[in-house]
Image: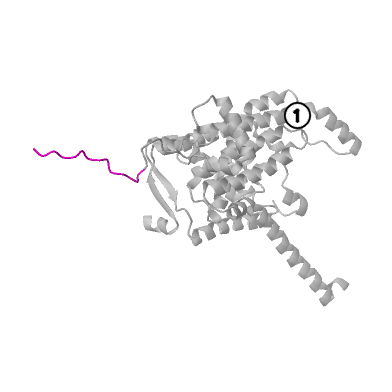
Amino acid sequence: MSANFASWGLSFRRAGPRDRSLAWVLAFAAASIAALSPWLPVLARFAPACPLHAWTGVPCPGCGTTRAVLALVRGDVSGALAWNPLATLALAFGVGAAALAPAWVALRGPMPVLVPVLPARARALLVALIALDWAYLVMRGV
Amino acid sequence: MEDQPPESPTPTLEPAPGPVAADPVIPWEADDSPWASRLVATIQLLFTRPREAFASVPLDGDLLKPFVFALVVGSIGFSLNLLWEGLVRGAMHDLMARTGGTPRFELPLVAIPFMALFSPALVALAVVCTAAIDHLFLLIVGGAKRGFGATTRAVCYGFAAQLLLALPFCGGFFAGIAGLVFSIVGFSAVHRISVAQAALAVLLPVLLCCACIALALVTYGTAFLGSFGSGALMK
């Protein structure tokens, strides 16, 4: 199993004291989302329009993220996935991981470590995920 | 007992022990002066010698220090921006009325101080989201050599650009440009990569969009020109 991860440039180590500050930064950000969530519909009106979409009518890879966040805040997971699947999955996983980070570090859970330069296939996978998500957004006309 | 001459000290080429010159540390993380003067010194260094500033960011230290720096400068910039918006709103309405433009959504004036209170939470979110997106593109270009912590540190100090939001009318534009410059210089310094590689990571989303537009134009253009040849437009 670990050999599989290693071939993608990913390994794991035990969390230690040096991870504490990053964990608290992430937890602060997660708490900020929780504190701001009642105000997000109002704040979203300040979000600038996507210039690519405004000029060409073609959505950018990040289009639909604000609407996905608003749907997530309402608890509408399927609606959020429809607006931008990749952003929704990244946000849901990211916020969950950020909220649990201090406890995870305190319990010395396994921490992911990436090699300094990712193998070509790992980079290709990242690009492919972004491209697939983008193709979906273009086809759906987000 | 035979008298022996006293041993003469042998000459040595090793330097005499003394204080070892430590690597310079960005003023915000040097604990030898009050925080306000460290803040001013760090901002000065970032705007005058950004390369030197980012090169002196300790990568193994406490991440909370750069995070607090970002919270302070980001909140100041955001709050001053809100203040300007409240102050110049009347002038903007007059301008819109003359040019026939429609005013965008505006926060009620009473909500502005309330929003300023929320600015640290907004800045915290912005720091983590920016660091995550930038780190993703650094990974794609093979430039994330020092881990997510290093990217986050560069993003935190790069938030000094948000202070330019304090400039009325054009603050957003200058803050955007300075933010790009700080990101490129910062990632280049903390990850020990070339400026070109850092610039590629920061500008990759924009380049990707431009490339796709160009591809679409070529595809549609070819199809359009081809329709002349087949006489499709004549039907």
Amino acid type of the residue that numbered disc 1 sits on in the rendered structure: Trp
Can you tell which quarter of the image residue B21 is in?
Answer: top left
Q: Chain of mark 1?
A: B
> Which stretch appears magenta?
B1-14
Q: Position of residue B232 (x, y in %)?
A: 83, 73
Question: Residue A15: x and y, percent?
Answer: 39, 41
Tell me, yes or no, if residue A88 can be seen here: no
Percent across and percent down for residue A61 are 64, 52
Residue at the left extreme of this rendering: B1
Left or right? Give the position of A90 relative to B89.
left
Q: Position of residue B77 (x, y in %)?
A: 67, 32
Q: Is residue A62 above or below residue A27?
A: below
A71 relative to B62 in the view: left or right: right
Q: Give the side of residue B188 with respect to residue B166, left or right.
A: left
Q: Camera-side residue: B167 or B26?
A: B26
Task: Report the residue that reaches farthest toward the right.
Answer: B98
Instruction: Reply yes or no: does residue B6 show up in magenta.
Output: yes
- Quarter of the figure with the C terminus of chain B: bottom right
Q: Quick one: label 1, few (<14), some, or many (20+) residues within 10 Å?
A: some
Q: How is the image coloured?
A: one colour
Residue toward you, A37 or B156: B156
Viewer-proximal residue among B36 and A14: B36
Q: Quadrant of residue B83?
A: top right
Asked whether the viewer can see residue A48, the reply is yes
Quadrant of residue B39 in the image?
Answer: top right
Closer-to-camera residue (B233/B146): B146
**Disc 1: which residue:** B84
Q: Is residue A50 above or below residue A105?
A: below
Query: A6 left or right of B164?
Result: left
Residue at left offset 75%, top offset 25%: B109
